[in-house]
Amino acid sequence: TTQPSTMQFTIAALLVGSAAAFAPQQTVARTAVVVAGTGKYDGQLWDMAAKKDVWGAWDPSKPRADENFNPFERDPTGNAPDCSGYFPGEGKYKDPARPDVNF
């Protein structure tokens, strides 16, 4: 009778462990706010070189600001920030000037 109870325990453990895969994801609220909305590349081409420049100057220990943010960060829906650190749907978001992608 030891085997059935061990098997039942194993099945129960697998069911409980896999239930976490179907639980809703927790969303993290963004507490930092971009102040002015005039980033270093505002009105300029927002290409990979500009993003690398902003990323190189980014200091994660300081508060998020229009010139201190991670340009490769994504919001919960997968959108990238503009050149001032705003995401689509936020008040001061401006569609950045993107490079031509025609090949």
Image (cartoon, rainbow, N blue to C red):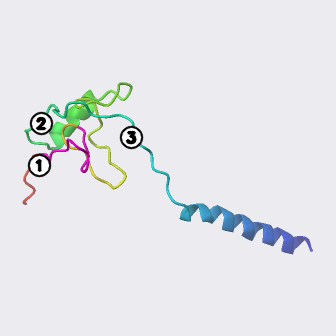
Above or below, comparing residue 61 to residue 22 in the picture: above
Residue that badge 2 annotates: 42
Disc 1 residue type? Arg
Residue at horizontal 28 percent and vertical 52 percent from the top: 79
Whether the magenta-drawn stretch holds residue 103 is answered as no
Residue that badge 1 annotates: 98
Residue at horizontal 55 percent and vertical 65 percent from the top: 22
Earlier in the chain: of badge 3 and badge 2, it is 3
Element at label 3? loop
Residue at horizontal 11 percent and vertical 49 percent from the top: 98
Magenta-colored segment: predominant secondary structure: loop
The image quarter containing residue 57 is: top left
Viewer-side label of 3, 2: 3
Tell me the distance, in whole angstroms, between the alpha carbons under discs 3 and 1: 25 Å
Residue that badge 3 annotates: 30
Q: Furthest residue to the top?
A: 62
Q: Furthest residue to the front?
A: 91
- In this picture, which residue range is highlighted in magenta? 85-96
Whether the magenta-drawn stretch holds residue 93 is answered as yes
Image location (x, y in percent) of residue 61 = 39, 25
Crowding around mark 1 (Cα neighbors within 10 Å: few <14, some 14 to 19, many 20+) is few
Q: Are marks 2 and 1 in contact (CB under 8 Å)?
A: no
Disc 3 residue type? Arg
Image location (x, y in percent) of residue 73 = 32, 44
The image quarter containing residue 13 is: bottom right
Earlier in the chain: of badge 3 and badge 1, it is 3
Tell me the distance, in whole angstroms, between the alpha carbons under discs 3 and 2: 22 Å
Above or below, comparing residue 42 to residue 20 in the picture: above
Please name whichever residue, 80 or 34, is drawn nearer the observer in this view of the structure. 34
Is 59 situated left or right of 103 in this image? right
Disc 2 residue type? Asp
Crowding around mark 2 (Cα neighbors within 10 Å: few <14, some 14 to 19, many 20+) is some
